[in-house]
């Protein structure tokens, strides 16, 4: 799979889009989505809570200001969630970034 060159800000916006869709789907189905999340919580309520916790600060990081500052904040936030490979939150972020085609490997090297 070829990775597209998108900014960290675009990756964060994509994660928020996934979060909205998955939370809405789980609320409607009253069960987990079919999206890949191997070590995520089994209970869909807990999945909703975890996804909401992951994305809680994303909108504030994208508030008006310089494009450079927003990009820096987005990179910091992504690094925070990519910190643990076995952490369910990190797994959720990584699998969704993979779907978006965002190359997060450079962020891992500077951790």
Image (spheres, rainbow, N blue to C red):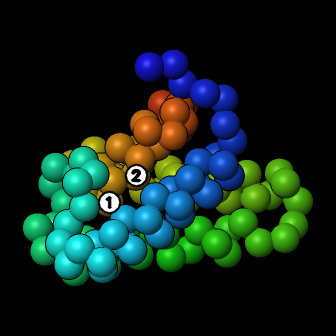
Q: Which residue is mark 1?
A: 89
Mark count: 2
Picture quadrant where residue 13 is located: bottom right
Seen as rendered, the residue at the extreme front is: 28
Residue at disc 2, secondary structure: helix
Picture quadrant where residue 58 is located: bottom right
Give the residue displayed 47% in from the left and 69% down from the top: 20
Picture quadrant where residue 40 is located: bottom left
Dot 1: within a 10 Å radius of its alpha carbon, few (fewer than 14), some, or many (20 or more) residues? many
Give the residue displayed 28% in from the left and 72% down from the top: 26
Give the residue displayed 20% in from the left and 66% down from the top: 32
- The reply to whether the C-beta atoms of the residues labelled 2 and 1 are less than 8 Å apart is yes
Seen as rendered, the residue at the extreme top is: 2
> Where residue 38 sits in the image (x, y, percent)?
16, 49
| Front residue (pair 111, 55) | 55
Dot 2: within a 10 Å radius of its alpha carbon, few (fewer than 14), some, or many (20 or more) residues? many
Label number found at residue 93: 2
| Front residue (pair 61, 22) | 22
- Distance CA(mark 2)–CA(mark 1): 6 Å
């Amino acid at each position: 799979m070829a990775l597209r060159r998108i900014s960290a800000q675009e990756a964060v916006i994509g994660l928020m889009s996934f979060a909205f869709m998955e939370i809405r789907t789980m609320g409607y189905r009253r069960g987990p989505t079919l999206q890949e999340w191997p070590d995520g919580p089994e209970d869909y309520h807990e999945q909703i809570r975890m996804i909401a916790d992951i994305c809680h600060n994303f909108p504030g990081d994208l508030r008006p200001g310089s494009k450079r500052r927003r990009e820096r904040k987005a990179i910091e936030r992504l690094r925070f969630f990519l910190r643990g490979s076995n952490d369910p939150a990190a797994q959720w972020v990584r699998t969704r970034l993979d779907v978006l085609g965002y190359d997060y490997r450079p962020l891992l090297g500077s951790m």
